[in-house]
Amino acid sequence: MGASPVPRPPDDLLNRFVRRAREHGKEHRGHHNQNFVHPLTREMARFIGRESGIFPEPDTSVIVRVRRGDALPVVIRTWENESELLRALRGTLPHVPACLVSRPGFAIHSHVEGVALSGICGDGKPVDSLVVNGLTELLARMTQVRREALPPLPAHWPRDDKDSRGFLRTLAHLADTRVRRRNWAEFGGLFAALGIPGDVLTRLADRVPAMARRPYSLLHADLHRDNVIVSYLGEPPLMCVDWELATYGDPLHDLATHLVRMRYPEDQWDEVVDAWARAMQKARPAALNGLGKDLRHYVAFERAQSVFPDVMRAARTLQSALDQKSLDDATLVVHGALEAAAEPLGLTDLPDAAEVQRVLYRWQASWRGRHGGEGPVMSWRPDKRFDEHPEFPQTAVLAALAAEGAAPAGRVFKGTAHLNSVVRVPGVDFPVVVRRRARSFCRREPSPLNEHVVLGAIGRSGAKVAAPQVLALGRSHLDDPFAIHTYVGPPDGDRPPDHPVNGLRPHEADCLVDQLRALTEVDHVALGQAVEPDFHTWLCRQLVHLVAELPEESRQFARVLGLPDADRLRQILRRHRLTDRRHSLLHGDLNPWNLVRRDDRFALTIIDWEMAMVGDPLYDLVRHMHLTPTRPEIRDRMFRRWASILSAGHTKDWERDWLVYRRIEIVRSAYVDLDRLVTGASLDAPNVRRAVDSYAMTLAAAMAALGLPARSTENPYLARALPRGERGGTKEADVAVSA
């Protein structure tokens, strides 16, 4: 008599069924899982019944959910095991699928025959009121689940289960640690190029205001049209699927994510909120506390954190898609995500759609260049005004452009006017920086000379001025102009430059004055700027022109604040006459972020020469002192050294005239900084941020310099113009000003 056959292990049976479902089942592909609908075999039906206590009939369709190995880590999970949660909810919520079996990497759920709401009513279309009522009732019913019935919460969860502010702050910090940080090594440079710094979510968490207290409850947290199944048989009529992002917290968060992710038309939002309020009034009235005031904070968070998964997923599609349509589609998604996140994250100077496309193209080309395969090839056209640099041939230029899109966040620096990416080029033993002009940037102040011309003249002169070298100039794909300079900063290229943001040290002050003297040796006539003999008159005319060309809203605020219009300003500025001094090349914008510390006899390298001009050397020194925190003893030291080492023709009557230049710069700042506050332009740049944060003092000093009476700060328009002391534009309702 033979031995009894050994039964096959259940896991072997499961694995064969899952394999068959993946090969023959109907697939529904999500961001995080692959879902395959497949009928049960008789053997599988018996096995599942023994394990789950649910006994489906053979040939009943089930859903095999397989976690995608290539999914980006862009979600916040409160519970890692969705199956554990579904088992906890069994018998409590009828609209939740049953978990029949789960194993590492996959699970099998019950399936309701029906169609996803997205197949009936696509994104952006209005949802039938009956469905809206059904969905909001489902959300309200979740509040009936007791916390004790749910799996244990993480240790970092708020202890007070009515602390709405604590819950939102927790979400913001989790979005930073589990989404932003986990992907920063791969995508950080892309976000930096798009104008999104790495600390925006932590800053958002710090800005969460006090909110009404609401009792926590179970939340689905991802209820959109793809996750709502309309059943064919009507029992249950609606089913919520995909519970892997479910959480426990403020029910207002569930309403906000539902509103945003369902993509309701804007004119249907009030209907949805009213329906939710009616349903919640019956189920958990306390959940309505502060609804009108606090919902906007959760909506803002949802839009803010969504920028990270939206951008990363769009960029990920470009790793395999090579056609222009894919690039256009990704551009549309990324630009829309940036616009939605701009206000809640306090972002300014975001790129327009064309600039987004150029950034994405560079990222795509760099990625495919690193990983091989066909795809976008970076090309460029040399600028005929610039000859090939002997130490940086065309092959090196291509290598730099190919590396640009892959530069990590720590090597991408976004200033007021430029995007700078520090890269390494094979065969070149020093790092270089690829400079791109921000197309959205609008410079109000004059920029009469081309930077590459100025740097070339400095280099040819042999003057002892520490400045970058221009290595290449041209246009890359999509007609995108660029320049490549030697990098000024730590030689490894992995650390940011050190700027004297709190003022110069004594030896640095001496070295800067020495470099300003060396600029007088540069042949400024060859630069081609049409120079008027009276630099002061020219400077005043430029300031009057700046005021006349300000946007209407900025000019309106200037009038309300008491600042004179262009004609009146011209009359006031005519009061002064200055001594004519010999002209020289000026940097024009010696703020601390245009000075980089170095460990040699130069002490400082001067960068960003885009505002260089020819004029009175006294103006360069005075403007530096206006833009940089300068202690009186450092100011006196610089003036003494400057007057002693420059020729008499450059310094005549400086003691009388420097205060005139100082007053001009104070007045200029009053207009320029007001314009930045009104328009929100360049507020993320550190030099701009510091300037606008002290605008009240700037305004008072400007009015005194003009000889005009200051107006009361109780004026509500003035309140709007004054800064809040945080990133982002100003809002009248957010500003409190004391007289």
Image (cartoon, rainbow, N blue to C red):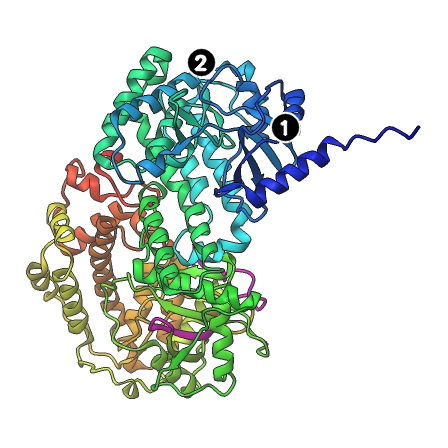
Q: Amino acid at mark 2?
A: Gln
What residue did someone put label 1 on? 42
What residue did someone put label 2 on? 144
Residue nearest the observer in this picture, 131 or 390 = 131
Image quarter of the N terminus: top right
Q: Position of residue 480 (x, y in %)?
A: 35, 71
Q: Residue furthest right?
A: 1
Q: Which tag, 2 or 1, sits closer to the chain's start?
A: 1
Q: Position of residue 253 (x, y in %)?
A: 39, 28
Q: Position of residue 98 (x, y in %)?
A: 54, 24
Determine the image quadrant of residue 39: top right
Residue nearest the observer in this picture, 729 or 266 = 266
- State which mark lies toward you, 2 or 1: 1
**Residue name at image x 51 percent, y 57 percent:** 410
Q: Is residue 579 left or right of residue 28?
A: left
Asked if residue 416 shows in the view, the reply is no
Asked if residue 93 shows in the view, the reply is yes
Category of crowding for the residue at label 1, using alpha-carbon neighbours closer than 10 angstroms: few (below 14), some (14–19), many (at least 20): few
Tell me if residue 478 comes above or below residue 89 in the rendering.
below
The Cα–Cα distance between marks 2 and 1, rounded to whole angstroms, is: 37 Å
Q: Amino acid at mark 1?
A: Arg
Determine the image quadrant of residue 127: top left
Q: Is residue 129 left or right of residue 39?
A: left
Bounds of the magenta span?
A: 477-503
Q: Is residue 152 left or right of residue 189?
A: right
Task: Give the secondary structure at mark 2.
Answer: helix
Q: Is residue 112 magenta?
A: no
